[in-house]
Amino acid sequence: MSPELLTRLLALEGVPSALASARDGIDAMLRDRGLRRTTPETTAESLLRGAHASAVLEGSSSSLDDLRAGTGDDVAAASVRLSAQLLSQAPVVTRSPLQAFARLHTLAGAGCVPDEALGRPRDADAAARLRDLGPVVTADAPALLVAAVVHAELLAAEPFASHNGLVARAAERLVLVARGLDAKSLVVPEAGHLALRPAYEARWRGWRDGGRAGQHAWVLHAADAYVAAAEASPLHDV
């Protein structure tokens, strides 16, 4: 994988308009509802909603209230650990993407996998795919596209010993923050994917197995999910 992939994806039918529409919706929501209403508590709520949605996509049966009470299952607990420290990696991910991805896995996998496996690629092929993904994070391309590609590739590559889905979805949110599209992390991309779950599960496998057609379908799905992510923002509650 190389940053040239992003250029090719942007040339596909419907991709520029879908991404632009999603970006406009996010910008409008942040401008119209975020003005004078943004607090650290709103960001914390967005992160918690994202942790819950990501955990459900990973197989958790815990409710959002369970997460609020700290009584969620192991998957939910891992997702909460990850979300609680996610924003600390925003300065890191554009400087050293591999370091940030490793930290995400360390947070998610703590206590679940052997210490020597935390943050480490499973094998040489996984390490190579992570290295190839690094330049994509900082490429000159729309933030939504970069986030979507990072998410899909981390899911497809399964580079770590565990929790790859949680890491992939956290990395997507992290890219949106670090690239400045959603600096206060108020949209909930994980909830956007959960709202479109059948398409989400089909499309990321299409990215993995379906060649260029699969990549095209994934990016269009991601644009739809980002629209739903804006609708899931806690800014709509205030």
Image (cartoon, grey):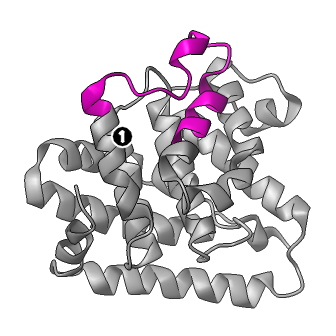
Above or below, 165 relative to 143: above
Q: Residue sitting at 37 percent across and 70 percent down? A: 145
- Comparing 133 with 81, the one in front is 133
Quarter of the figure with residue 104: top right
Residue at figure coordinates x 68%, y 19% from the top left: 73
Q: Quadrant of residue 224?
A: bottom left
Instruction: State the residue at coordinates (29%, 47%).
Output: 204
- Above or below residue 129? Residue 123 is above
Q: Is residue 83 left or right of residue 190?
A: right
Residue 132 on image: x %, y % = 30, 50
Seen as rendered, the residue at the extreme top is 114
Foreground residue, 8 or 165?
A: 8
Q: Amino acid at mark 1?
A: Leu
**In the image, residue 152 above or below residue 82:** below
In the image, residue 160 lies at what x, y percent? 43, 27
Instruction: Give the quarter of the figure containing the N terminus.
Output: bottom left
Q: Residue at x 61, y 76 (%)?
A: 180
How many numbered circles does the render carry?
A: 1
On the rendered image, what quadrant is the C terminus found in? Answer: bottom right
Q: Residues within 10 Å of mark 1 (few under 14, many from 20)?
A: many
Residue 94, quarter of picture: bottom right
Q: Is residue 89 visible?
A: yes
Residue pointed to by mark 1? 155
Q: Secondary structure at mark 1?
A: helix
Which residues fall within the magenta stretch?
Answer: 101-126
Is residue 151 rendered to the left or right of residue 172?
Answer: left
**Residue 198 seen anywhere in this rendered image of the structure:** no
Residue 5: % across, % down: 21, 66
Q: Is residue 56 magenta?
A: no
Return the x and y of residue 78 as percentages of the image width and height: 66, 27
In the rendered view, tell whether residue 95 sits above or below residue 181: above
Is 105 one of the magenta-colored residues?
yes
